[in-house]
Amino acid sequence: MISYARQNSDEQADGPASPAEEHIAPAPRVSVQAFCETVETAAAVQSAGEDRRLAKAHLKIQMGGMAAAVEAYRSAPTPNVIILETEGHNDVLTGLDQLASVCDAGTRVIVIGRINDVTLYRELVRRGVSDYVIAPAHTIDVVRAVCNLFSAPEAKAVGRIIAVVGAKGGVGASTIAHNVAWAIARDLTLDSVVADLDLAFGTAGLNYNQDPAQGVADAVFSPDRVDTAFVDRLLSKCTDHLSLLAAPATLDKVYDFGAEAFDAIFDTLRTTMPCIVLDVPHQWSGWTKRALIAADDILIVAAPDLANLRNAKNMFDLLKAARPNDRAPLYCLNQVGVPKRPEIAASEFAKAIESQPIATIPFDPQIFGSAANNGQMIAEISANHRAVEMFLQMAQRLTGRGETKKPRGSFLSPLLEKLRSK
């Protein structure tokens, strides 16, 4: 019998859900086979297979619907997930009964149909169907349906990865990443970890005033040892809610990695931390590109000059094209207002990139320099500095969380509360 995995009782929307409104955890290495009846559904499933969240899944598409599935599995083992498109009512129930006789235990089934009927849905659930998607199915519907099979409601939420990268070297991307992570941990009280991926010249240890003996290099050079316990030993505690996976910042080794070198580390961090902030160095290689594309949200940091504008636009366009079902990358302008330096206005950035910056951080060498030299965050040096509020706003945007601070009431608030209670 087809095993029951998880039902999606939410009513399907007319179109694809906005990626900015939800966090869909990536699927593990599973085999998925789809049996479609229409070219439109086959195209949606094919597009879903190209989404970053199904990058590890092995997807195969075949036409013929329910009948083709029943015939295919008479002499072949079933995959982890079967996607079935059907256009009938009785046909789907009869077909599922036939499929159950040839289906391996543990296989999960997603049905795509055109009938929006609660009776049919209950019959599908009774037969062990994991999810029912109302056609026409969009790419994000297929991605959501498959990924949700492996995100049980009772399980700990899979962590969100936020990648911060500079459009050019020296624009302060690491400083922004570390202060935003601090705001996520302190103001949003979300357990977070900063992973410093600049193994040769990383500054996270200096900025957080930490000097751990171990860090990210120990994990990337020992991929066979990477598991939850091993990564936990590598983490350095900065605050109650913030940990650091530090870079060695030494030159005794050459840090050349393959494209998948950090995958095991990121997968392990996802299972233990609600929020992972990647401090991505300004370089273009297979693993940096992979880390950016695979992140849930991306923040590009740029200074207001021509080279930064060109680089930011190139990165924005490439990442947006590579992640068609995700929220577009975000960007901020840093070091704005350097005396006597000609600068490109924020409006010109917005016109070229076709998106407004989420923050424009003014040039303040005194406060930022003091924080860097003391191994502190801006909020520790000057709690009322205007950049502190900007870091909080960026933290909220990147994590999808709203305001956490309660509005300040007037001195009449207690009296008004008593009157309301009476």
Image: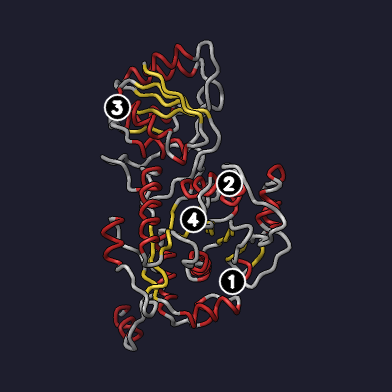
Whole-Å distance between the Cαs marked 2 and 1?
Answer: 26 Å
Label 3: few (<14), some or many (≥20) within 10 Å? some
Q: Which residue is mark 3?
A: 40
Give coordinates of residue 246: x percent, y percent.
Answer: 64, 61
Q: Earlier in the sequence, mark 3 or mark 4?
A: 3
Q: Earlier in the sequence, mark 2 or mark 1?
A: 1
Label 4: few (<14), some or many (≥20) within 10 Å? many
In the displayed structure, 291 sits above or below 370; it is: above
SS for tag 2?
Answer: helix
Label 1: few (<14), some or many (≥20) within 10 Å? some
Colouring rule applied to residues: secondary structure
Q: Earlier in the sequence, mark 3 or mark 2?
A: 3
Whole-Å distance between the Cαs marked 1 and 3?
Answer: 51 Å
Label 2: few (<14), some or many (≥20) within 10 Å? some
Q: Nearer the viewer, mark 4 or mark 2?
A: 4
Q: Which amino acid lies under the numbered mark 3 shown in the image of this protein?
A: Glu
Give coordinates of residue 281: x percent, y percent.
Answer: 54, 57
Q: Which residue is mark 4?
A: 163
Residue 267 badge: 2
Q: Residue at x 64, y 60 (%)?
A: 247
Q: Which amino acid lies under the numbered mark 4 shown in the image of this protein?
A: Ala
SS for tag 4?
Answer: strand
Q: Which residue is mark 1?
A: 207
